[in-house]
């Protein structure tokens, strides 16, 4: 039976799925079932035009939409010890890692970058759900720490785009230790007087919420994202009753005082930029002065100096 | 009546026989029974020592959860005089899963945070089996703030399967409460130390265990997720908890080898539940040593030591 469940069924399923969506040109809206052409989604930042369903976004796209003209500099993140636990569940952790790297062309689940957002310097870290569920292990922790340090060094605000199933269990206690470790650098941002904005995207759960993702100065959530500490199945098993409608969704968290606002993906950049400008007491950056066609770089430099 | 774990069966059988003989001896005159008792007791001791010298991670999990194992209140009642528990988070309610308050440890004022599992049905319900809701962590933050202001060290006894997974807990920000508690630990300008006395269950534990000095009892466990939950996620089969316990490296020895913890406190043969006084006294000595080492440090030095210690974790692994 196990063999059938583990080997045969997934094969049948993947075979059927491939047939259903040839070449992934048409993508099904998870909410309404509507088929949307991938170019239309792409043009709409992967938000389904009719239903407004926010699809998962790759870290690459996220950075592209966030930074001015889609231009940014990747920040190198430290290398970490690989598989110190020599972990093996149904597969070896090193094999899972290898697959995830091949599939995503990333080194781990968090990428860090800096660039301009509406003309001002900004540092950001993005968690990519495609890399082992965006799970938080040593590499991701170090990347976030490095990003926050970079923001402190360059006196920029720090924006965290969170998306994660939680701690990476294959790294055991070392993954749990990323909770206090990332909190250390959140404190450094605070001490440096720099805004720390968290954008909670679908899904952000587990240990990630129990640390840096819930320690922002401002919490912004994308619509209808799953955000919570305990898994829904675990809660249902514990209390033996059905969960309320919309439980652990962005709007629910806003109504319960855990996030400041639920913001459409199209409005994210402006919202964040405005918040940072207000907190840092700086003028809203004007798009390049019409009468003075100087290089935008130069004007930015001057304006960015506090 | 002593309760035995399944793998302690050989010991249980032998000690059962010893008990029977003792009862026989009390009733009669049989002289040679004395020798037999001594012989059996010796065998039982040997069996116990054999078993406990090579406990598997899963067996340690069972020892860590042993119903007779000393819990936070046992440590507090023995080690802390004038203990004055304080209640409530001043926001929503009191949460008895975490005991918090002030008292005197060997003459010195300390703040105490202790996750309490309870030891009978009534007290287990009262303490919610040691699984705190957001209010427990917010109370912990409140007590840490007080301790910081009055320049009093904080001592945590960690013993929880994890933070409570419930609707109310989620609504009131379980994750945020844990994160703020960890945050508070890292911001303290007074020494804080923690001892994992039973189970160190994930975020629910780290919230009060982000400390200058972290110790674990020899047979306690500390993990990112319970072996059962880990098995159900990684193997899709919660009966593989033994494999999860082994693979996740959750024992004091493992954590010490990863340099995640600073000290292992030895337990007597047969585990803490067989000699509570000895174990609690050893925990007391560990607390005293750790506190005296940090006595001369300034608030900034303490913060720096704690931050650097946590940032170092994992960086020295090959």
Image (spheres, coloured by chain):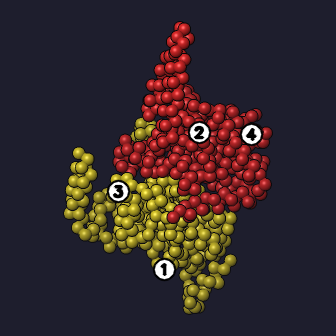
Q: Which mark is residue A91?
A: 3
Say which colour chain A has. yellow
Q: Compared with residue B295, is residue A194 higher up or lower down, i.e. above or below?
A: below
Q: Chain of mark 2?
A: B
Local packing at callout 3 (Cα closer than 10 Å; few below 14, some 14-19, many 20+) is: few
Q: Which residue is mark 2?
A: B267
Q: Residue furthest top?
A: B28
Residue B269 seen by the camera: yes
Q: Which mark is residue A71?
A: 1
Local packing at callout 1 (Cα closer than 10 Å; few below 14, some 14-19, many 20+) is: some
**Mark 1 touching mark 2, by CB under 8 A?**
no
Q: Chain of mark 3?
A: A
Q: Which chain is red?
A: B
Q: Position of residue B34 (x, y in %)?
A: 54, 17
Mark 1 vs mark 4: in front: 4
Residue nearest the viewer, comparing B279 with A277: B279
Mark 4 vs mark 2: in front: 2
């Amino acid at each position: 039976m196990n063999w059938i469940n583990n080997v045969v069924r997934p094969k049948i399923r993947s075979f059927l799925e491939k047939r259903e969506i040839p070449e992934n040109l048409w993508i099904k809206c998870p909410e309404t079932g509507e088929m949307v052409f991938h170019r239309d989604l792409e043009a709409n930042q992967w938000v389904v035009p009719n239903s407004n369903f926010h699809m998962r976004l790759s870290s690459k796209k996220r950075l592209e939409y966030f930074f001015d003209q889609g231009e940014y500099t990747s920040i190198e993140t430290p290398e970490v010890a690989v598989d110190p636990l020599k972990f093996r569940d149904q597969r070896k952790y090193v094999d899972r890692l290898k697959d995830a790297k091949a599939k995503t062309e990333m080194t781990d689940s968090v990428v860090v970058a800096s660039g301009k957002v509406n003309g001002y310097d900004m540092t950001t870290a993005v968690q990519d759900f495609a890399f082992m569920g965006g799970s938080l292990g040593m590499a991701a922790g170090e990347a976030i720490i490095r990003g926050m340090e970079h923001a402190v060094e360059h006196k920029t605000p720090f924006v965290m785009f969170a998306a994660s199933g939680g701690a990476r269990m294959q790294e055991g206690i070392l993954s749990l230790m990323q909770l206090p470790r990332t909190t250390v650098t959140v404190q450094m941002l605070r001490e440096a007087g720099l805004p720390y904005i968290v954008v909670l995207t679908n899904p952000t759960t587990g240990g990630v919420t129990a640390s840096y993702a819930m320690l922002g100065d401002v919490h912004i959530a994308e619509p209808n994202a799953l955000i919570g500490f305990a898994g829904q199945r675990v809660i249902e098993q514990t209390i033996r009753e059905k969960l309320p409608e919309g439980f652990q969704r962005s709007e629910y968290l806003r109504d319960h005082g855990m996030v400041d606002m639920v913001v459409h993906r199209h409005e994210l950049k402006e919202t964040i930029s405005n918040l940072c400008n207000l907190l840092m007491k700086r003028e809203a950056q004007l798009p390049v002065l019409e009468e003075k066609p100087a290089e935008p770089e130069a004007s930015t430099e001057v304006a960015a100096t506090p | 009546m002593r309760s035995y774990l399944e793998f302690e069966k050989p010991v249980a059988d032998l000690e059962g026989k010893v008990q029977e003989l003792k009862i026989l001896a009390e009733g009669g005159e049989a002289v040679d029974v004395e020798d037999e008792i001594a012989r059996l007791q010796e065998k039982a001791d040997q069996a116990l020592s054999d078993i406990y010298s090579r406990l598997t991670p899963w067996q340690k999990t069972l020892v860590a959860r042993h119903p007779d194992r000393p819990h936070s209140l046992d440590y507090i009642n023995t080690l802390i005089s004038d203990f004055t528990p304080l209640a409530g988070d001043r926001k929503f309610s009191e949460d008895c899963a975490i005991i918090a308050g002030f008292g005197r440890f060997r003459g010195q004022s300390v703040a105490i945070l202790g996750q309490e599992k309870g030891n009978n049905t009534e007290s287990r319900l009262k303490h919610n089996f040691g699984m705190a809701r957001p209010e427990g962590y917010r109370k912990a933050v409140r007590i840490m703030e007080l301790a910081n202001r009055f320049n009093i060290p904080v001592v945590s006894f960690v013993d929880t399967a994890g933070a409570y997974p419930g609707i109310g807990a989620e609504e009131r920000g379980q994750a945020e409460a844990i994160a703020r508690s960890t945050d508070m630990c890292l911001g303290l300008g007074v020494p804080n130390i923690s001892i994992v006395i039973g189970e160190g269950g994930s975020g629910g534990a780290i919230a009060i265990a982000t400390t200058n000095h972290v110790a674990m009892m020899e047979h306690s466990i500390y993990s990112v997720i319970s072996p059962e939950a880990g098995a159900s996620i990684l193997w899709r089969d919660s009966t593989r908890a033994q494999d999860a316990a082994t693979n996740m490296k959750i024992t004091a020895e493992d954590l010490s080898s990863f340099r995640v913890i600073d000290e292992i406190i030895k337990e007597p043969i047969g585990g803490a539940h067989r000699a509570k006084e000895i174990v609690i006294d050893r925990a007391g000595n560990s607390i005293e040593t750790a506190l005296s080492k940090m006595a001369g440090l300034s608030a900034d030095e303490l913060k720096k030591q704690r931050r650097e210690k946590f940032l170092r974790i994992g960086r020295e692994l090959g």
